[in-house]
Image: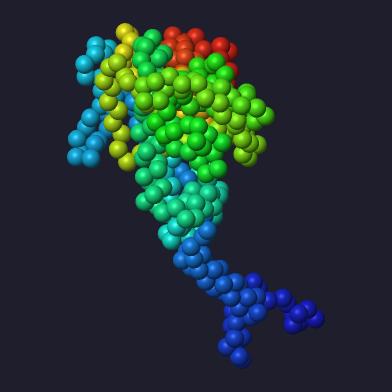
Amino acid sequence: MSIFDDETPQSEESRWTSDPNTGRRPLRERIGWSALTVAIVIGVVFAFIPSPYVIEQPGPVYDTLGVAENGDDEEVPLIAIPDETTYPTDGELNLLTVSVVGRPGQTPNWLEVIAAWFDRTRSVIPVEAIFPPGISSEDRDAQNQAAMVDSQQDAIAAALVELGYDFPREVTVAGLLEDSPADGILEEGDVIVSLDGTAVHSINELQTAVQEHGADEPAELEIVRDGEPLTVEVTPTERDGRAVLGVGVRMVYEFPIDVELQLDDVGGPSAGMMFALGIVDKLTPGPMTGGEIIAGTGTIDSAGRVGPIGGIRQKLWGAERAGADWFLAPESNCDEVAGNVPDGVTVFAVETLDQARSIVEDVADGDVTGSYPSCPA
């Protein structure tokens, strides 16, 4: 017998079997089962503990040239212009939405949050960033719905201005803020016609004029009050680094034609540009898109200026899922676009409705390479 017979090492199998004398499993096996048990317990706990976050993800996509269901589950055109000559359209002009998973008291659990962190199509956001404290979900929904209604009116105005219609566009005082420098000078219902001789036809134009004037001296305002023209002076004040008049304003339009926009259960102002493009397409001969699927997002004012929006990362992925090859993004959102562009999608940086219209028309003609600014992929 070899002197090594009694020193033969145990096989891997024998080292993991129970000790025949004690019935206990070896230490390595017991540690392994303990670790697995702890992992299962942690997983169960994480599955039930709510997080302080909500998740943003791509929401429904709506073709402004198409139809959607109304509150009675009937299909209706997103854009209807009943009393005017309209023209056949082709392709799609898609507006994009973002869905939020969770709300105060019903936030996603930690497992859902961790999964979203590793999904580039979704974003994890602190719940208070979407649902500010002190504002109920009902109030937030009402505010978003009001913003959508206002943006639809602005979209109609922008489209009609783009098409050469002339109609009243009045920047109207809706109220005075606390400690307003305009207190006792401006009144609710006043129409602001110009500032320092510069005509204003949109809220953005008024804000720009106030910024250019600054907060050092009185600004001359031409207003209309109860049908009578007046000239008054208001010295803007500085708040959060910006010169302001200290008034809340809203737009009042008298449209020359009837344009009806239909989109239920969607809030916020970001559909403005795409609605405006859809109206222009319906009121001009020939399909503007040339059959292409074009998506986009952006606020708009009656002067046709395109403004920034939230959730653009999720909207890019929503566009890709809807089959869009082209995406119109507000130029001011380009920093959020970089690094988040799906393969096969070309993103244009847009500042005005006129520019967006030109891009769509050139996409239809197959002539956009290098012609327009783009957001970096």
- The x and y percentages for residue 238 are 63, 36
Number of residue marks: 0
Quadrant for residue 33, please give it: bottom right
Q: Residue at x 37, y 12 (%)?
A: 166
- The x and y percentages for residue 68 are 27, 32
- Please name whichever residue, 93 or 323, is drawn nearer the observer in this view of the structure: 93
Farthest bottom residue?
A: 21
Q: Residue at x 60, y 82 (%)?
A: 25
Quadrant for residue 236, please give it: top right
- The x and y percentages for residue 198 are 54, 16
In the rendered structure, the answer to whether residue 243 lies left or right of residue 277 reads right
Q: Quarter of the image for the C terminus: give it.
A: top right
- Please name whichever residue, 205 or 183, is drawn nearer the observer in this view of the structure: 183
- The x and y percentages for residue 363 are 46, 14
Q: Is residue 94 above or below residue 179?
A: above
Q: Is residue 39 above or below residue 203?
A: below
The answer, for residue 218, to whether it is visible in the render is yes
Q: Residue at x 47, y 55 (%)?
A: 134
Q: Is residue 28 above or below residue 204?
A: below
What colouring method underlies this structural image? rainbow
- Please name whichever residue, 320 or 143, is drawn nearer the observer in this view of the structure: 143
Farthest right residue?
A: 3
Q: Residue at x 78, y 78 (%)?
A: 4
The answer, for residue 90, to whether it is visible in the render is no
Q: Is residue 321 above or below residue 170?
A: below
Q: Quarter of the image for the N terminus: give it.
A: bottom right
